[in-house]
Amino acid sequence: MKITLNGEMRDVGDGTTVAGLLKDLGFQTEGVVVEINGTIIDRTRFEDTKFSEGDRVELVRFVGGG
């Protein structure tokens, strides 16, 4: 199925969860905010939140520095 990830089309498998996508992208769940169709997803729901065809997904990673 197709989703839009940070403005670009991406194919993901049926049943892909937020946690699965983050793992595929090499992201840790800490320090990442996930928004699906304008709604921020609570980190505790990453394992059970699945994507649907056409979802608009935004991932924001926090990077420390100084």
Image (spheres, rainbow, N blue to C red):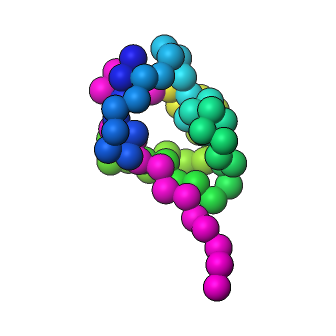
In magenta segment, residue 21: no
Residue 6 placement, left or right of 15: left
Start and end of the magenta stretch? 51-66
Q: Main secondary structure of the magenta part?
A: loop
Q: Residue furthest top?
A: 14
Rendering coords of residue 47 (x, y %): 64, 32
Residue drawn where x is 32% and y is 44% of the image: 7
Dividing the picture into quadrants, the one containing residue 48 is: top right
Q: Is residue 52 placed above or below 14 in the rendered structure?
A: below
Q: Which of the two residues, 14 or 6, is positioned nearer the viewer here?
A: 6
Residue 34 placement, left or right of 43: left
Q: Is residue 63 placed above or below 26 in the rendered structure?
A: below
Q: Is residue 19 visible?
A: no
Dividing the picture into quadrants, the one containing residue 52 is: top left
Q: Quadrant of the C terminus?
A: bottom right
Rendering coords of residue 25 (x, y %): 60, 38
